[in-house]
Amino acid sequence: MSTQQIRFSETGGPEVMRLVETEQPRPAADEVVIENRAIGLNFIDIYYRTGLYPTDLPSGLGTEGAGVVVAVGADVSDFAEGDRVAYAMGPLGAYATHVAMPARVVIALPADVDFETAAAGMLKGLTAQYLLRQTHRLVAGETIVFHAAAGGVGSIACQWAAALGARVIGTVSSPEKAGIARDNGAWQTIDYTKESVPERVMALTDGAGVPVVYDSVGRDTWADSLACLQKRGLMVSFGNASGPVEGVNLVELNRGGSLFVTRPSLGGYADTRARYEMMCADLFAVLASGDVRVPIGQRFDLAEAGAAHTALAERRTTGSTILLP
């Protein structure tokens, strides 16, 4: 049997991606083969495609999806053919109709979570989990800043933070995205194309600032994010949508009031199977409760992966984007 897969042999723009037909993969001893029903699209995929995050070439793309197990490796005992599963943090190659994934990154999918929700929400939802429940454990009554509040992670994080009793000040780039962020639980929104984010944050907090800023934008928002923090506040830089933060001057942290900075990643938190399962259970629980839903703003056919990348890079997307094989 054959499978269709997106591959690239050189780094560059969306045009380097090619849809190719190959043999359906066979599982190694520690792997399962999954027939994808939906595939997650994330900014990290663009980082690999452009070469910001190096990988051996030629390569597949994508680390997240959901589907049905169709083959099981000899050493795998936790899964069987026909199981509904999801995965995140896998090796590159999820942009495919069939994919072989290490069993350690595969998780059984509860019956009340559909394939599209899982593919759209695994990586983003687990990111929200570690940001809000581990990197800085939110408590009721806190006011926080979350950049790109209408995006994939932001849409989930706004809901989750609101369910925890926190007040989210979300930054957005348009009135439409402001409405989406508010619909997802943001207390206030700031259109960074028209307003000074630090000035507005200080006005909303009576000059106190916030204890934590969550920033996936990177270079363009670094200085403004630091300026939003109260003394001994925490700057959480977890993405590079506008480019990586460079030339960090530690004296700035002192001048801001003994500020803290961290650059976390999902792999740094879900670093054992036990922690991965705990985080997935936490995510599935808030999905089951109805406190958090995964808004899917865009669906593209697998063959349209290039158009999907372009829309994401140009910030023309809202919520999560998925590819359909």
Image (spheres, rainbow, N blue to C red):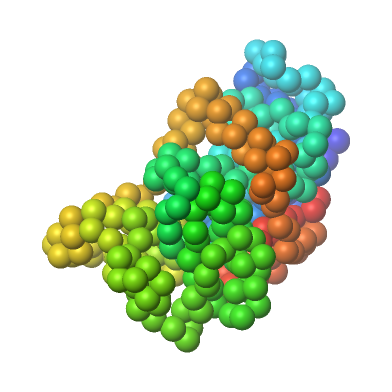
Residue 164 horizontal side relative to residue 141, left or right: right
Tell me where residue 276 appears, x and y as whole percent.
54, 30
Q: Which of 205/26 is in front?
A: 205
What residue is drawn where x is 56% and y is 53%? 162
Number of numbered discs on residues: 0
Tell me where residue 298 appears, x and y as whole percent.
74, 64
Q: Which of 317/150 is in front?
A: 150
The quarter of the picture where residue 22 lies is: top right
The quarter of the picture where residue 236 lies is: bottom left
Residue 52, placed above or below residue 243: above
What residue is drawn where x is 23% and y is 58%? 231
Tell me where residue 204 appears, x and y as whole percent.
41, 72
Residue 188, placed above or below residue 86: below
Q: Residue furthest bottom?
A: 194
- Residue 233, can we see it? yes
- Residue 219, can we see it? no
Residue 219 horizontal side relative to residue 70, left or right: left
What residue is drawn where x is 37% and y is 68%? 205
Residue 160, placed above or below residue 50: above
What residue is drawn where x is 69% and y is 17%? 78
Tell me where residue 147 appears, x and y as whole percent.
47, 65
Residue 188, placed above or below residue 47: below
Q: Which of 163/170 is in front?
A: 163
